[in-house]
């Protein structure tokens, strides 16, 4: 256990020291700083209930002679609880947040490495790009690609190119840029001697050493003047250029990479001088070796991307805004390939993945499950002591931006309580690396642990595809709850930007006026699994036991986005060719070795649709629905027919339906007239024997 140092911030928070079981400080960062220094001499890890003075406490640690037992941990109770309108009743929330800060850290994850030598390409109009190149060339290996002419410096301290970018991809330390040289003057070869300027009769060349083709009358005097250098060619055939860089500063109004999360090492400040200065400062620190977490884990064995050359599920590819995920087919088997250097850790791929093949791993889902279970348990225990039966609301938010918004809202609510609403006493904030990284299993699991509802705070900076994915998944989660007779418990709070405190304040005001919800069900004890489907199945079983209404025998219809569901089959069209069995990546469709029967286990189906695309008779259709746990586990025969026996040897070589269909389609063809039609009723061996007999 950690030693907890709690301060009421000069008496501005009405904290109950006895209820929290801690010694209460009033000015821990000032007059009572001795208490902190004394705590450093102890043998317990320290949790400081103050984030504002984190730098001060860190500096005091650095000056201490005794090394820390463990790194300091900070938790904010002021803005999220002590400075809100319901501060006096926020004791259970504060206790829960302190307990969360006291939990063991997540296991370390693998890292992704980058190496940058400082090779910087600045793209933009010559006047701006060249000015920044002059400033940065002493510290970085700078090159400039002028997309608009600008006065070239006489000294050649760095390479200057001109043209239009045709392709730009890569990441920190590994960018590839392609461009087309459009102007007759190649600045790479030009010595800037000025001979071409002197001889041009139309003054079509200036100190940018580019020809204004609107003025040029094709006298070609410049070509003659530059003959010994060879930098000018009006009939140049090879115009394509390419090079590699470690960093890119794209100063164009319409940058090449427009995704919400650009790759590491790519910056697009546009034409704003302040933004350009901020980027330039960042670039100076990007020389050397760097690393970031590997955010994801991928299990190819359960991936439903493709089989038999057919694409089934491409949800992760469609939702990835950075282009880090691509399709890969080998021998007809489809999987996805993730470039970890391009992955920015949004986790949306894991949210939309129906099979759990793509899993978010920073931190792991089981670790997050333990943390939210601790939050709800401690909150509930403290509420019970106060004779309250409040079920907390779990407020999920992106760790960095969401924390900034919540902190700003808390300060605004403290200073302007009539204008802004802080977090209600029953709302527990929980920061995750990115709001898009949690989905169906996490939300429903949280409700199974005893939370009354789950609210997702979107700061407005997310890619539109992430917001759409979260809306789709939350609708699915609420549909599942509706199937059991529960009301909707998953909602999104969408701000327009990270500065839009009013939208968050309004949402918190609505929650406070409505009051806390009762728990959906009796809290469960199971832990979250790394396997998404396992967690979902455990949640469904728990919810079914406490459902308000039983599921219909035929199942409850779910949205088309569902990862749960069955198959509708046209038995008249199906020939039991078993193509669907071979294509199913999850083993939901099964054949029978002894007789022509097609079976289906709904629990295994992830609604990828590969079987539908593979079926030659188009006899299958997805049926998103929710059956009981018992029904979904059963192996059900969805079609069967009689076997067809060879008319010569009696061996089974197909189904009666398949042979009848073949006879109907080929019987009218001249090649199968007369005795030849009987060969269609024979197995392959007997067919050959019969043909040889007829020939002899």
Image (tube, rainbow, N blue to C red):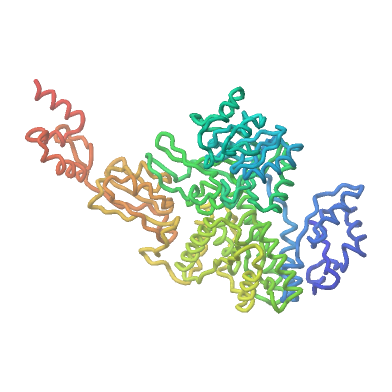
Quarter of the rendering containing residue 144:
top right
Q: Find residue 593 and report its horizontal and vertical position in percent.
A: 31, 40
Q: Is residue 112 visible?
A: no
Q: Nearer the viewer, residue 507 or 47?
A: 507
Determine the residue positioned at 13% across, 23% down.
692
* Residue at the front extreme of this rendering: 201
Determine the residue positioned at 38% across, 47% down.
610
Question: In what quadrant of the picture does the C terminus appear?
Answer: top left
* Residue at the left extreme of this rendering: 674
Question: In what quadrant of the picture does the N terminus appear?
Answer: bottom right
Q: Nearer the viewer, residue 657 or 676?
A: 676
Instruction: Relative to 225, say whether 513 is above or below.
Output: below
Instruction: Relative to 498, say whether 137 is above or below.
Output: above
* Residue at the top extreme of this rendering: 696
Q: Find residue 91 and report its horizontal and vertical position in percent.
A: 74, 71
Q: Nearer the viewer, residue 248 or 325?
A: 248
Q: Find residue 41 and report its horizontal and vertical position in percent.
A: 90, 53
């Amino acid at each position: 256990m950690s030693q907890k140092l709690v301060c009421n911030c000069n008496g501005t928070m009405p904290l109950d020291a006895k209820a929290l079981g801690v010694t209460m400080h009033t000015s821990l960062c000032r007059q009572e700083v001795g208490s902190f220094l004394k705590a450093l001499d102890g043998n317990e890890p320290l949790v400081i209930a103050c984030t504002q003075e984190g730098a001060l406490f860190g500096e005091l640690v650095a000056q201490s002679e005794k090394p820390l037992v463990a790194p300091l941990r900070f938790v904010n109770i002021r803005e999220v609880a002590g400075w809100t309108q319901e501060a006096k009743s926020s004791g259970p929330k504060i206790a829960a947040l302190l307990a969360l800060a006291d939990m063991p850290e997540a296991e370390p994850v693998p890292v992704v490495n980058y190496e940058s030598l400082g090779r910087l390409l600045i793209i933009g109009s010559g006047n701006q790009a060249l000015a920044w190149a002059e400033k940065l060339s002493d510290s970085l290996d700078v090159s400039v690609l002028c997309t608009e002419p600008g006065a070239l410096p006489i000294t050649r301290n760095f390479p200057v190119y001109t043209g239009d970018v045709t392709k730009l991809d890569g990441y920190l330390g590994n960018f590839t840029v392609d461009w087309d040289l459009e102007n007759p003057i190649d600045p790479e070869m030009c010595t800037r001697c000025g001979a071409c300027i002197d001889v041009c009769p139309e003054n079509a060349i200036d100190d940018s050493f580019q020809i204004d083709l609107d003025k040029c009358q094709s006298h070609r005097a410049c070509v003659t003047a530059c003959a010994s250098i060879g930098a000018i060619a009006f009939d140049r055939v090879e115009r394509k250029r390419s090079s590699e860089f470690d960093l890119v500063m794209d100063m164009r109004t319409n940058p090449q990479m427009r995704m919400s999360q650009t790759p590491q090492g790519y910056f697009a400040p546009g034409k704003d001088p302040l933004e350009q200065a901020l980027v330039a400062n960042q670039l100076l620190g990007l020389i050397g070796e760097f690393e970031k977490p590997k955010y994801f884990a991928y299990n190819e064995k359960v991936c439903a991307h493709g089989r038999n050359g057919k694409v089934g599920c491409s949800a992760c590819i469609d939702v990835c805004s950075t282009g880090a995920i691509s399709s890969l087919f080998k021998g007809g088997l489809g999987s996805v390939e993730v470039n970890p250097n391009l992955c920015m850790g949004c986790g949306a791929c894991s949210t939309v993945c129906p099979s759990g093949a793509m899993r978010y791993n920073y931190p792991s889902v089981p670790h997050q499950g333990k943390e939210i279970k601790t939050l709800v348990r401690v909150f509930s225990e403290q509420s019970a002591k106060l004779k309250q039966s409040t079920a907390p609301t779990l407020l999920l938010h992106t760790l960095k931006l969401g924390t900034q918004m919540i902190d700003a809202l808390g300060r605004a609510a403290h200073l302007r309580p009539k204008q802004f609403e802080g977090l209600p006493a029953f709302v527990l904030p929980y920061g995750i690396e990115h709001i898009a990284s949690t989905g169906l299993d996490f939300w429903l699991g949280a409700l199974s642990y005893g939370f009354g509802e789950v609210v997702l705070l979107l700061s407005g900076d997310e890619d539109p595809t992430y917001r759409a994915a979260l809306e789709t998944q939350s609708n699915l989660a609420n549909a599942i709850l509706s199937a059991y007779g529960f009301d909707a418990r998953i909602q999104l709070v969408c701000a327009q930007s990270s500065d839009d405190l009013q939208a968050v304040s309004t949402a918190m005001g609505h929650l406070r006026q409505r009051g806390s919800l009762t728990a959906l069900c009796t809290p469960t004890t199971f832990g979250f699994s790394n396997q998404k489907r396992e967690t979902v199945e455990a949640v469904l079983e728990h919810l079914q036991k406490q459902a308000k209404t039983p599921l219909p025998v035929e199942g409850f219809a779910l949205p088309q986005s569902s990862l749960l569901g069955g198959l509708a089959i046209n038995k008249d069209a199906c020939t039991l060719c078993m193509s669907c069995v071979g294509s199913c990546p999850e083993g939901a469709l099964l054949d029978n070795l002894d007789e022509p029967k097609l079976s289906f286990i709904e629990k295994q189906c992830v609604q990828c649709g590969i079987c539908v695309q593979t079926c030659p008779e188009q006899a299958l259709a997805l049926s998103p629905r929710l059956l009981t746990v018992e029904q979904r586990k059963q192996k059900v025969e969805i079609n069967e027919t009689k076997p067809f026996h060879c008319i010569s040897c009696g061996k089974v070589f197909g189904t009666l339906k398949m042979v009848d269909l073949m006879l109907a389609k080929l019987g009218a063809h001249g090649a199968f007239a007369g005795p030849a039609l009987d060969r269609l009723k024979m197995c392959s061996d007997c067919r050959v024997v019969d043909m040889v007999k007829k020939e002899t």
